[in-house]
Image (spheres, helix red, strand yellow):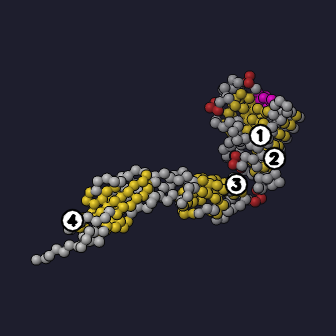
Amino acid sequence: MTQQVFADGPPTVTITSSPTNPSSQTTPIFEFSADQESTFFCSVDGGLSSACTSPYNTSALTGGSHTFAVFARNLSGETGPTDTYSWTIDLTAPNTILDIGPTAITVNPVATFEFSSEPSTTFECSVDNDNYATCTSPYATSDLPLGVHSFGVRAIDSAGNVDQTPAIASWTVVDESAGDGTPERPFKVRVCDDLSGINFAITASYEMANDIDCSESTVVPIGNANVPFTGTFNGNGYTISNIDLYNDGYLGTGLFGAASGATISGVRLVDSSFVEGEANGQYSMGALVGVATNTTMSDITSSNLSVSTADSSSNYLGGLVGYMEGTSVLENSHFDGTISNGSNSQNGTGGLVGFSIGTSNVLQSDVRNSYA
């Protein structure tokens, strides 16, 4: 006959595995053991204790502070002390902030980024839509080829929550011979897509390096009423041809949707169509600029252009400029083509400029040595 031997004294229980603190797990698992054969009793957040075994999986818990408790009872019926573990369930993802990145257009093949978030976060980065991988700030890419690139970074907090809306940046690496956007070294515009790309660096200086044919490209206006073009653009007398621009949603229609304090010169527009759609509402359009504010436009020539609007679309329509205000100047320029302003011709339609107005105490907008 085997005699059962009972341990001397109550059992001691120890929690051996628990979730991290904080944690994003809503059904955490606990493991525990005792120094003698025992039955275990578990409770969560001060609830009634019930018999349990290790490992123990809780029911679904909400975010916030929680406490797990377990004690053991040996074969003699003695109950030992309770071991507890308190932790926080954090279900809120961190926000990732991109503090520093490259300019929209750069000649540097290496891009450097700095980013931040709440304390105790780690980060994952992705370049050009590759898989996200662990990274630290500052982060520098390898040498990148010429063209458009993208970067994403997301924060992961100490609870394991991942930012589901990473901070994103995009930029274009150009050949050094393409310039750097300063007045001394303006960006070179060589192909039609370079025109729409000006929207990524709306304040820089540009110059055309050759004739441009847009027959195979989609052109969107450069700048709009909310973010106008404020840089310089020198066409150098080169031709932009075969633009087919239908604008339905941008504020201002033309090669330049809106320009403010800008200088535009030496542009020749040929064999192109500019149409403002019905859905755009009442705005202004011209083949060169929709709305020009304190902008100087000179030596603009054209041939075989069509500038038109849908019914009730534009307030002001001009061959070259829809609406010109402030100290704007249009000089040594001409328009050759057709103009159609739907049912709104009474609002302001002109061969060169749809409407021109000066601001009090400054020079009147001026048209000089220009014809249509």
Q: Amino acid at mark 3?
A: Thr
Please tell me the numbered disc located at residue 77. 4
| SS at badge 3 | loop
Q: Quadrant of residue 256?
A: top right
Please tell me the numbered disc located at residue 103. 3
- Give the residue drawn at x 73%, y 33%: 285
Foreground residue among 108 and 255? 108
| SS at badge 1 | strand
| SS at badge 2 | strand
Mark positioned earlier in the residue sequence (1 or 3): 3
Quarter of the picture holding the C terminus: top right
Give the labeled residue for mark 2.
234
Q: Quadrant of residue 28?
A: bottom left
Viewer-nearest of discs 3 and 4: 4
Give the labeled residue for mark 1.
260
- Give the residue drawn at x 48%, y 51%: 92
Please tell me whether residue 354 belongs to the stretch shown in magenta.
Answer: yes
Contact, CB < 8 Å: mark 1 with mark 3? no
